[in-house]
Amino acid sequence: MNARRLRARLRSSLRGWGGVGAMAALCALAVVCALMLPLTQPPGPDDAAASTLTRGLQTRAETCENPQDQSLDPAGGSGSTPTLDAIKARKDRRLIVGVDQNSYRWGYLDPNNESGALEGFDIDLVHRIARDLLGDPDAVQFKAIPTSRRIDAVRGGEVDMVVRTMTISCSRLAEVAFSAPYFRTGQQVLAPKNSSVTGYDTSLAGKRVCSADGSTAHDALAADRTSGRLPASTDIRTTVPNQLDCLVKLQLGQVDAVVTDGALAASQAAQDPTVELKGGLFTDEYYGVAMKRGADDLVREVNGTLRDYLKDPDGWRASYTRWLHPTMDQGGRKSASATPPAAHYQ
């Protein structure tokens, strides 16, 4: 019996009931019919395509190893540059890049800089990419993108690329393309100096830990609490759009510790002398430039820039010395991040 005939029969049988009772019964029937409808319909082409895509993304993530080595060789390709040509054809001929404007020494607004321009290690790299691609290091439109929206911004075409302390991971490779790595770091714990937290260990039992939504830090916390590496009593419910918001919550006493990239944690510790890094890095991760999947020509062009930038004494090393050396190389010891990562292409 179809839904229309069923409703007609029900209306007939409800004569003499109170209007409210009849209406309630009809509403309940409508809900049941709506819930049953998808179960009675054969899968359409869109459903099949979505299912196939989901399986493909899951397979790619499950079979991926060494995600930092999955990018394209700058020397390869057909020589065609459709993505770059489209960028050059814009009226204002600018590269649109998603960045951070709140990460000290990475991408931030220095109140002492009268020009009001963004500064930092990631910003230096963006200028080099713009110089190589468009012949002008300032041919850039910067867009502040929160941590949680980096992938959406790339996939939706809101930006040409994201240069924002973004870790290359297997799951992310299923959604966006990455350049070769330009920085090596890992996850680390940040907590008040007088805290009982000693690192990523049992001292986090019963503690409130903050991480950025959509970050590899949050993924690690969730996975490790499930596996037992992290105490089950660790409260990881606090997430924020931008990782710097975690430092604010730590300062306000709303959380007990922060888990984020060690490089970012070092910069945050430099901003607040009451907090410090606890323990060492507990993951091994690499930052890359994120671009839309299928934009192979742009990926290869960016990799060509990185190949030269990482070797240039006035490039990567000069930028590291200026921005990151003061916070990362402590106690007379050079950080493991002080050496540019090697590129290995797929």
Image (cartoon, grey):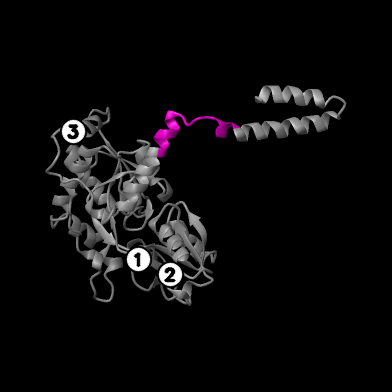
Classify 250 as above or below 142.
below
Cα distance, mark 3 to mark 1? 39 Å
Mark 3: few/some/many CA within 10 Å (<14, 14-19, 20+) = some
Classify 211 as above or below 61.
below
First in sequence: mark 2 vs mark 3? 3
**Residue 103, quarter of the rendered image:** bottom left
Q: Principal SS element in the magenta part?
A: helix
In the rendered structure, does residue 80 fall within the stretch colored magenta? no
Mark 1: few/some/many CA within 10 Å (<14, 14-19, 20+) = many
The residue to which callout 2 is attached is 229
The residue to which callout 3 is attached is 81
Report the mark closest to the observer, 1 or 2: 2
In the image, 22 versus 174, the foreground residue is 22
**Residue 324, quarter of the rendered image:** bottom left
Where is residue 61 shown, x and y percent of the image? Answer: 34, 50
The residue to which callout 1 is attached is 266
Report the mark closest to the observer, 3 or 1: 3
In the rendered structure, does residue 41 fall within the stretch colored magenta? yes
In this picture, which residue range is highlighted in magenta? 37-51
Q: In screen coordinates, is 252 left or right of 145?
A: right
Secondary element under disc 3, as helix, strand or loop, is loop
Q: Can residue 286 be seen in this view?
A: yes
First in sequence: mark 3 vs mark 1? 3
Cα distance, mark 2 to mark 3? 46 Å
- Residue type at mark 1: give it: Ala
- Residue type at mark 3: give it: Thr
